[in-house]
């Protein structure tokens, strides 16, 4: 059954989600890519104020096209970015900011999965080829920050039923990506036997 969730999301609620669940998220989600992750961690370690509070919230690995400025910001398009580009920062980010969900595509590494298991966080995969569907769930784009990072700046969006999103890595240590990779490795062995 599809699950409709509203942010903030408790650690307990995140831990109840299982790999394979279909989720729709509502509330504020912060768009952050690798350069913004790096800066956020630097700010945190230096005790500088941050332009967000992510505890029990979600982040989105995506790019977006905005028009307008200030109170008239409008998101015309957004699409998930490949999450592997954030692997270097995500484990520490999860632990320090206590986020409960990451939206993206392609999955993340084992170190990130371990941090998710430890902190109570899930990875929600966007379905490929459906960017316009997801864009239509943006109710409002409220703010940009760290604009010097250009396309990698941070952006706050408010969503209504962002989805469908697949729980692809859960807080129990399960990963659909690893299951698919393991099956592919097994299939490759049988292919090799037939070829050689």
Image (tube, helix red, strand yellow):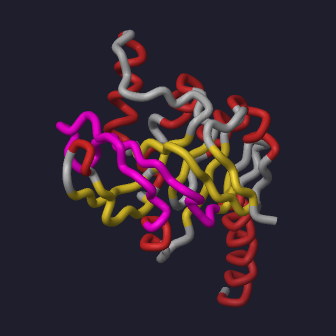
Residue furthest to the bottom: 194
Which image quadrant is residue 40 in?
A: top left
> Where residue 189 appears, x then y in whole percent?
72, 75
Residue drawn at point x = 33 percent, y = 28 percent:
39
Q: Is residue 166 left or right of residue 173?
A: left
Asked whether residue 4 is drawn in magenta, I would say: no
Looking at the picture, tell me which residue is in the foreground, 116 or 195: 116
Where, quadrant-wise, is the N terminus in this rendering? bottom right
- The residue sitting at the front extreme is 71
Count of numbered circles on the image: 0
Q: Is residue 141 above or below residue 154?
A: below
The outermost residue toward the top is: 47
Q: Residue at x 22, y 40 (%)?
A: 149
Give yes or no for residue 154 being in the magenta stretch.
Answer: yes
Q: Position of residue 129 (x, y in %)?
A: 47, 77
In front: 19, or 50? Answer: 50
């Amino acid at each position: 059954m599809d699950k409709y969730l509203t942010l903030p999301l408790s650690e307990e609620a995140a831990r109840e989600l299982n790999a394979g669940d279909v989720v729709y998220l509502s509330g504020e989600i912060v768009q952050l890519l690798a350069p913004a992750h790096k800066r956020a961690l630097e700010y945190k370690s230096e005790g500088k104020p941050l332009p967000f509070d992510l505890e029990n919230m979600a982040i989105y690995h995506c790019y977006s096209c905005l028009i307008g400025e200030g109170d008239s910001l409008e998101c015309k398009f957004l699409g998930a970015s490949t999450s592997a580009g954030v692997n270097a920062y995500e484990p520490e980010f999860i632990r320090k900011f206590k986020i409960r969900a990451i939206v993206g595509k392609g999955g993340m590494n084992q170190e990130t999965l371990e941090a998710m298991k430890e902190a109570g966080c899930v990875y929600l995969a966007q379905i490929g080829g459906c960017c316009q569907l997801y864009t239509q769930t943006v109710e409002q784009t409220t703010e940009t920050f760290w604009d010097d990072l250009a396309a990698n700046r941070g952006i706050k969006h408010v969503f209504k039923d962002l989805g469908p999103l697949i729980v692809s890595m859960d807080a129990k240590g399960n990963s659909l990506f690893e299951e698919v990779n393991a099956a592919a490795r097994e299939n490759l062995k049988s292919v090799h036997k037939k070829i050689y």
